[in-house]
Image (cartoon, rainbow, N blue to C red):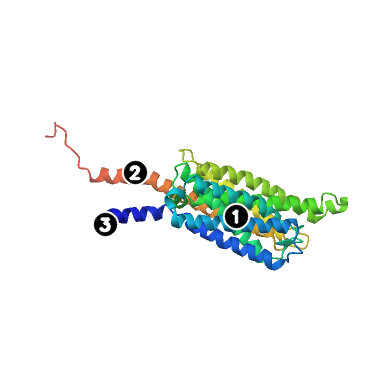
Amino acid sequence: MPSVQVEFNTEYQNAHRFPAWMALSVFSIVCLAAIGAESTRDERDAAIKWSLAVASMSMIVSFLAVVAYLMARGVFVGQTPETALVVFVLAFWGAGLPVIMNPSNGIAVRDDTVTNANLYFFSWLSLAATLFLGASLAQERTGMNVHEMATASPKTTRWFGLAASSLVVMGAAVRIFREVCEDALPVVQEGAFCKRSKLAISVGVVSFVLSSAVAYLSSQRSNAVMPILAETGLTTLLLIMWCFAVGYVTFGLTSPGSKIGNLYFATWISFILAVFLFGQAFRDYVSGRMNANSASDGPTAEDHQMHESTPEIPDDDQI
């Protein structure tokens, strides 16, 4: 009886990706329904048909994965079939999301404004679910403990999140700059809108490079760690950059990210992550300084106390 209980728990502990597959199937169904509700069969062009294909294939694949987890866990979980399905959905959403989010296609976004909220948000959630599946499976295949890494270093997750949101800011700002400023008159290129678009691109590039490097170093299990003073300085720089980005990119009529869209959300998400990273780094810095001060003062006081409490041993002449 005890052996059966241990085997049962072990099987379900190995099924930690099952909720992600369930979520992906639900997200895909919502995306499919959102696309179908906003267009008729006669109105569907190549972009809409491709979006329908992505959502449909994602729904089918995730449903098959859910069934496999329930019916054939031993030959599916962490094996080649699950790896193939994860790669499949990653490729589909990686190729389908840019089409869905392209304002020129008018599927989820039109004129840099979200027109299909369900499709917009659940497409991003579908991509997030597939990224989690890919990262979890890759770490499991390489022998890493996903749960242990996630609980031991939440800071690493924030660095990866900042890298991803910075990449979205960079891509969205580049697209806006190409559509509005690249072939425009010099007076438009020198205007506030184009200058702020360049600022968004610059901040996105710098933040992506720095956060990607720190995230990679943090994810490596080595003895080398970033000095707390350097991390505090880096997070301070990123926080200042994103403060300027939020102000110049999302506020005002001449701002490229003033409308609800990818640039707006990604800029604010990057700013929030920068705030969290700075707060954690500053807390660690202050805590380290306090520990260092207490460590330097501790031995002196302890030695003084031991010196007072230790009786003097008389010399042989005194005896």
Q: CA distance from mark 2 to mark 1?
A: 54 Å
Q: Is residue 14 above or below residue 32?
A: above
Count how many numbered circles sit on residues in the image.
Answer: 3
The amino acid pointed to by label 1 is Leu
Q: Which residue is identified by label 3?
A: 1
* The N terminus: image quadrant: bottom left
Residue 275 seen in the current view: no
Specify the quadrant of the image occupied by residue 302.
top left
Q: Which residue is identified by label 2?
A: 299
Say left or right for 101 vs 191: left
**Helix or strand or loop: what does disc 3 sit on?**
loop
Q: CA distance from mark 3 to mark 1?
A: 42 Å
Seen at 53% across and 58% down, the residue is: 63
Residue 26 or residue 155, whichever sits in front? 26
Say left or right for 217 vs 266: left
**Which mark sits nearer the N-terminus, 2 or 1?**
1
Say left or right for 287 vs 183: left
Q: CA distance from mark 3 to mark 2?
A: 55 Å
Residue 150 pos. (x, y %): 47, 51
Residue 29 pos. (x, y %): 60, 63
Seen at 28% across and 46% down, the residue is: 305
The amino acid pointed to by label 3 is Met
Seen at 66% across and 50% down, the residue is: 95
Which one is closest to the eye, mark 2 or mark 1? Answer: 1
The amino acid pointed to by label 2 is Pro
Binning the other alpha carbons within 10 Å of mark 3 as few (below 14), some (14 to 19) or many (20 upward) gives: few
Binning the other alpha carbons within 10 Å of mark 1 as few (below 14), some (14 to 19) or many (20 upward) gives: many
Q: Are marks 3 and 2 in contact (CB under 8 Å)?
A: no
- Residue 127: mark in rendering: 1
**Which mark sits nearer the N-terminus, 3 or 1?**
3
Residue 125 seen in the current view: yes
Quick one: which residue is furthest to the left in this view?
Answer: 319
